[in-house]
Image: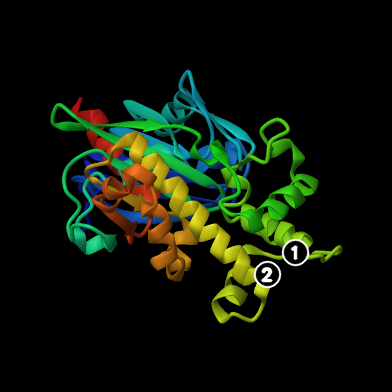
Amino acid sequence: MAQPAGTMHEHWNLVADIGGTNTRLGVISNGQLTDLRKYPTESLPELLDAFHSLRDEIGTDPRAVVAAGAGPVKDGTIRLTNAHLDLSESDIGKATGAQHTFVINDFTAAAWSVAEITGDHVEVLQGAETPPVGTRLVVGPGTGLGVGALLYSQGRYHTASGEGGHVGLSPRHEDEVEVFKAARHIAPECFFDDSLVLEAEMFLSGTGIPILYQAASMAAGQTDAPRRSAKDILQDALAESDPIAVKTAHMFKTHLGAIVGDLAVAYMPTGGVFLVGGVAEKNRWLFKDAFRDAFNAGGRFSDLRRSMNLYVSEQDEFGIVGANNFCKSALAR
């Protein structure tokens, strides 16, 4: 017998993961993802129309909507830097009729994505097979370099998100000095004053790997260093068919390991350190001995770093998972 619209979703929530190119909308019933839709991220009216049309299809207003995206959040509005538009909680409320609306940064969502993670959804790089309860650190080398923390206090999680990709990166060895000097010609505005210290995201991300490759090429004496995609560079590094690509991949994984280890000492994540994001998902080979050795190389704190639990998250749609976990926590409060 045909069911009237809405009867299967009397109490449902809508979660969104908004990227610069595509937006994913997830339907949540009884805390679980039951449907996932993909739309192109276009103008604000078209984005809100996607929210509204999904609401109309289901036939009832969602109880809550959580939208996650890359950009700063202020006064209930997120500036979606990749999509070049502003999205407010009030806009979402008007489009969906939701009683509760939230806009959150994508790395707030990334941090929340590991709130309920189990051993079935991680690759263990070191430590416990099942992530223990406790503060968790999430680092995401994707298009950029995101960092989020899920702080555990008084029996529940809280998030702290910042701009981890903008911490300082400097040469680890003498032979890297010329690479950093060369990078000044490519991204001078990303250096810290007149030092050799560069914003980490400028090397340690999908956007940064081509810059690192170009700088390594220039340091090796190539005056017309080509601009190549991160995917192509890493494929050549894996195949060992291009020595500059091999050097680029080595610098990427050792510097990333060191930065993640430094952040871990700052946050003390007893619940684990998790890698997420496109570069981590598609290039698991990067996170082997050299990465782990750099993570653990902490001087007097090397033993502490070796005692930490380190994982690659294997959850599909971690942005949707994180928005859902955030939603559950927000409604429980």
Question: What is the quadrant of the C terminus in the image?
Answer: top left
Report the residue at 45% width, 60% height from top: 280
Give coordinates of residue 243: x percent, y percent: 66, 74
Give the quadrant of residue 268: top left
Residue 56 visible in the picture: no
Q: Which residue is mark 2?
A: 244
Residue 286 horizontal/vertical position (percent): 46, 66
Above or below: residue 108 compared with residue 125? above
Q: Secondary structure at mark 2?
A: helix
Q: Earlier in the sequence, mark 1 or mark 2?
A: 1
Q: Which mark is residue 311?
A: none
Q: How is the image coloured?
A: rainbow
Q: Are marks 1 and 2 in contact (CB under 8 Å)?
A: yes
- In the image, 150 versus 320, the foreground residue is 150
* Residue for point 23% across, 51% down: 307
Quadrant for the N terminus in the image: bottom left
Pointer 1 residue: 217
Question: 322 or 270, which lies in front?
Answer: 270
Residue 152 seen in this snapshot: yes
Query: Which type of secondary structure does the marked residue at label 1 adopt?
Result: helix
